[in-house]
């Protein structure tokens, strides 16, 4: 009988603690126990975002058969990444100068007309092309192409506008103003270059994946 009384007393104390906890939380003690909150929705939301990006940009392997772009680069100082970038640009100048020139010429005729819209597409395609041919570091070649394109665009624009009676600015002011006008282009250049390199890797990987599927 004493064991039964002990069990009843323990159950009563547990019930009292439960009621006190519910009251402290501002909940009705008559409610049943609820399961603890599950953090799964947060995880699933994070996983959902990752899955969306993975579907949008599936992983792309390196280009097959390409040598190490830094094979002859021997600098090991603290600024290796910066020096390596200039090393790659110096070894492959046409990969960023030519797209930059195309971008500048297309940008000069970009306006709201049909030809201007087509020129805008060409200018953005030139930056993508810089990343395509600059496979060694696509974003870098897109960035360099946009910067050299800005300089060419500002230089030609200054020559075309300077000296006109309705332009009350000096040549230096025009040049700096045109550069400032295109100040966001390096960001788009790096992004477009990255995409050009990514697109090339994806296209190169597709035939290999198709051959692997046929073998299976």
Image (cartoon, rainbow, N blue to C red):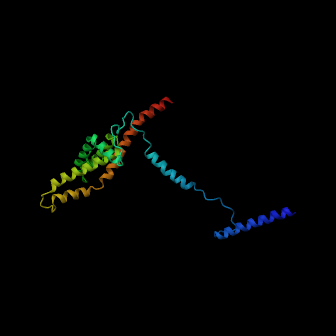
Is residue 138 something that shows in the picture? Answer: yes
Query: Which residue is drawn at the image coordinates 27% and 44% (left, top)?
Result: 96
Instruction: Tell which residue pokes out farthest to the top in this image.
Output: 215
Query: Which residue is drawn at the image coordinates 57% and 54% (left, top)?
Result: 40
Q: In the displayed structure, does residue 122 sit left or right of residue 24?
A: left
Query: Which residue is drawn at the image coordinates 68% and 62% (left, top)?
Result: 33
Query: Which residue is drawn at the image coordinates 54% and 53% (left, top)?
Result: 43
Instruction: Tell which residue pokes out farthest to the right in this image.
Output: 1
Q: Position of residue 196 (x, y in %)?
A: 35, 43
Residue sitting nearer the eye, 109 or 61: 61
Q: In the displayed structure, does residue 50 sit left or right of residue 178?
A: right
Instruction: Tell which residue pokes out farthest to the front in this image.
Output: 77
Q: Position of residue 42 (x, y in %)?
A: 54, 56
Is residue 44 placed above or below 94 in the rendered structure?
A: below
Residue sitting nearer the eye, 117 or 145: 145
Is residue 216 placed above or below 51 in the rendered structure?
A: above
Q: How many marks?
A: 0
Is residue 108 something that shows in the picture? Answer: no
Q: Position of residue 3 (x, y in %)?
A: 84, 62
Is residue 75 placed above or below 151 in the rendered structure?
A: above
Corner quadrant of residue 21: bottom right
Q: Position of residue 73 (x, y in %)?
A: 33, 40
> Which quadrant holds the N terminus?
bottom right
């Amino acid at each position: 009988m004493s064991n039964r009384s002990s069990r009843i007393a323990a159950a009563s104390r547990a019930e009292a603690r439960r009621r006190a906890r519910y009251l402290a939380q501002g909940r009705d003690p008559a409610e049943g126990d609820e399961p603890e909150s599950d953090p799964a929705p947060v995880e699933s939301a994070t996983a959902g975002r990752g899955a969306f990006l993975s579907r949008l940009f599936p992983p792309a392997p390196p280009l097959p058969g390409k040598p190490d772009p830094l094979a002859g680069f021997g600098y090991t100082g603290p600024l290796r990444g910066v020096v390596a970038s200039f090393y790659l640009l110096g070894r492959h100048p046409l990969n960023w100068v030519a797209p930059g020139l195309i971008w500048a010429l297309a940008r000069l005729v970009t306006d709201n007309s049909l030809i201007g819209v087509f020129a805008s597409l060409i200018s953005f395609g030139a930056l993508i092309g810089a990343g395509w041919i600059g496979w060694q570091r696509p974003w870098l070649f897109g960035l360099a192409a946009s910067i050299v394109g800005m300089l060419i665009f500002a230089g030609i624009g200054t020559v075309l506008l300077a000296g006109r009676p309705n332009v009350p600015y000096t040549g230096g002011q025009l040049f700096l103003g045109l550069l400032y006008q295109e100040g966001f282009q390096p960001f788009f250049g790096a992004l477009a270059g990255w995409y050009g390199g990514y697109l090339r890797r994806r296209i190169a990987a597709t035939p290999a994946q198709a051959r692997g599927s046929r073998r299976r």
